């Protein structure tokens, strides 16, 4: 089957060009100013912009075990609505994805029922308990793209070194959730003026920075590929900068909320501003933005973390950490950072497409002959409203609820198939 996308502006090598694109057998086979080949299906992208499909390296699909919050079907549909054609599923499911059977379950369910590609991230330790190395080699043979105990952090440095050495033997990237439990304590938000003002226990930046410093040293000793999830502080970025000057084994990501929000958002006691790592100071936020602009940060990842209303609608101290992010990522960053001139258009797009693909060596990330036909088509002049009625995730926990932002995904194409279409 041939699909022709015509009359749109294609994002090619950092620039927008008025061209057509032809798909056949799940691949891009032709890009030209005017394609006259006969096609079985035509997508008229007039007035729209055609991008490589967005890739998210950090998402929680809650399947198996917590499907009242999200499942592979609802999660990938929400991802597709947000323009994501591929998501990497973290292993903190119930049971934890720490063996080949769990990996195969997610892959099979995603293949049969998903609206986006799902890449599986296996657990770093068994049960993510931080006590014993997981079956990494077996899981890699089953297709995992990385290992992580995200949501948790290995506290024992000796075990972490063993994990990194083992992962290095099989060239498996290790993704860390940097958090020293002793320093984080029972903190709820960033430790600073806001936490003092509203009387909530604070999480010191050191809780993140100490683990990043430790794991960089351990990864360098082991020769392992280390990816730092949801980096959020200025000092953390300086640690990464110094490490990158020494080697190319260290990468990191930033979440959209750490680029546009600060702990000031917590003054309302809205539990949709509660996440881990917490929203930090304005100084930290600006440091993250500058690091994104300079290329120090390798990509943007949503850390999509769905929770049911009854879990979030309680006292701040008892509500779980995390917010959803698939559907809000591009519109919020486009309006808050691109349209205001803070970052360039190409910086945003590349950090949602090509750069995440490079971090985990995934296919896609650019519109190029022979690459998978994973494509996102947006109307940059339309508006997106995030209401409980139109969010496709099962969960609605977002600080941008009932807010409207510029840009709207019109089509999401995965392997040449239309997986999401914005119908009038």
Image (spheres, rainbow, N blue to C red):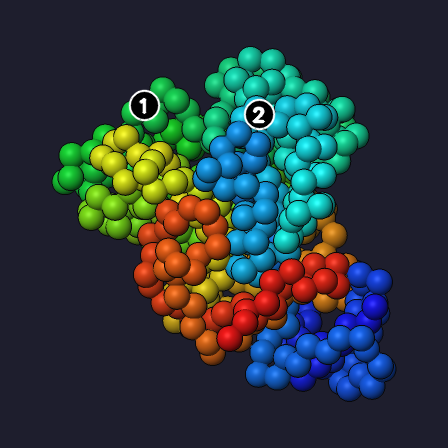
The picture places residue 349, in percent across and down from the top left corner, at 57, 64
Q: Is 84 placed above or below 168 here?
A: below
Res. 177 in view: no
Instruction: Say which of 298 and 88 sits in front.
Output: 88
| Mark 1 residue element | loop
- Residue at (39%, 71%) from the top-left corner? 340
Quarter containing the N terminus: bottom right
C-alpha separation, residue under disc 1 versus residue under disc 2 = 24 Å
Q: Which residue is pictured at 39% across the width and 22% down the height?
A: 181
Quick check: 162 left or right of 337? right
Task: Give how far across and how far down residue 185 sits, in percent.
Answer: 32, 23
Residue 65: % across, % down? 53, 29
Residue 185: image tag: 1
> Of callouts 1 and 2, which one flags the residue occurring earlier in the amino acid sequence?
2
User: Quadrant of the rendered structure where residue 311 is?
Assistant: top left
Which residue is depicted at the point 64% across and 30% down?
122
Q: In the figure, is residue 343 to the left or right of 204?
A: right
Q: Is residue 141 visible?
A: yes
Q: Secondary structure at mark 2?
A: loop
Q: Which mark is residue 285?
A: none
- Based on the displayed image, in which of its 4 quarters is residue 124 positioned? top right
Vertical placement of residue 261 versus 21, above or below: above
Q: Is residue 112 above or below residue 365?
A: above
From the viewer's perspective, tell me whether residue 50 is left or right of residue 1: left
Please tell me whether mark 1 or mark 2 is closer to you in this view: 2
Q: Residues within 10 Å of mark 2 (few under 14, many from 20)?
A: many
| Residue at 55 percent of width and 13 percent of height | 131
The disc at residue 96 is: 2
Q: Could you say where residue 365 lies in the image, as x and y percent from the top left? A: 68, 58
**Count of residue discs:** 2
Could you classify mark 1 by the number of other residues whose Cα lies within 10 Å: few (under 14), some (14-19), or many (20 or more)? some
């Amino acid at each position: 089957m041939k699909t022709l996308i015509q009359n749109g502006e294609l994002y090619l090598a950092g620039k927008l060009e008025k061209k057509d694109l032809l798909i056949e057998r799940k691949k891009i086979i032709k890009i030209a100013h005017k394609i006259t080949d006969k096609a079985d299906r035509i997508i008229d992208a007039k007035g729209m912009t055609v991008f490589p499909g967005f890739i998210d390296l950090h998402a929680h699909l809650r399947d198996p075990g917590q499907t009242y919050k999200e499942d592979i079907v609802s999660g990938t549909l929400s991802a597709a609505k947000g323009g994501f054609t591929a998501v990497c599923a973290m292993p903190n499911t119930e049971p934890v994805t720490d063996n080949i059977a769990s990996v195969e379950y997610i892959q099979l369910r995603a293949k049969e029922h998903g609206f986006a590609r799902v890449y599986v991230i296996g657990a770093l330790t068994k049960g993510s308990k931080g006590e014993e190395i997981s079956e990494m080699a077996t899981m890699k043979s089953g297709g995992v793209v990385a290992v992580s105990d995200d949501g948790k952090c290995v506290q024992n440095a000796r075990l972490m070194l063993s994990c990194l050495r083992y992962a290095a033997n099989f060239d498996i990237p290790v993704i860390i959730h940097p958090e020293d439990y002793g320093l984080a304590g029972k903190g709820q938000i960033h430790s600073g003026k806001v936490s003092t003002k509203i009387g909530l226990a604070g999480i010191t930046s050191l809780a993140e920075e100490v683990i990043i410093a430790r794991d960089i040293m351990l990864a360098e000793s082991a020769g392992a590929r280390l990816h730092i999830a949801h980096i959020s502080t200025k000092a953390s970025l300086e640690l990464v900068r110094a490490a990158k000057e020494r080697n190319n084994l260290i990468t990191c990501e930033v979440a959209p909320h750490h680029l546009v929000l600060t702990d000031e958002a917590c003054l309302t006691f809205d539990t949709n501003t509660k996440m881990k790592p917490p929203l930090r100071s304005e100084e930290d936020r600006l440091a993250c933005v500058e690091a994104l602009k300079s290329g120090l940060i390798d990509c943007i990842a949503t850390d999509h973390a769905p929770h049911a209303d009854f879990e979030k609608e309680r006292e701040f101290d008892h509500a779980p950490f995390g917010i959803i992010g698939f559907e809000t990522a591009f519109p919020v960053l486009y309006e808050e950072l691109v349209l205001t001139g803070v970052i360039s258009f190409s910086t945003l797009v590349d950090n949602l497409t090509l750069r995440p693909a490079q971090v985990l060596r995934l296919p896609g990330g650019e519109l190029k002959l022979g690459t998978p036909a994973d494509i996102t088509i947006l109307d940059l002049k339309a508006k997106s409203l995030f209401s409980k009625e139109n969010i496709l995730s099962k969960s609605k926990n977002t600080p941008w609820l009932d807010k409207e932002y510029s840009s709207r995904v019109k089509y999401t194409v995965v392997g040449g198939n239309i997986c999401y279409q914005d119908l009038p």
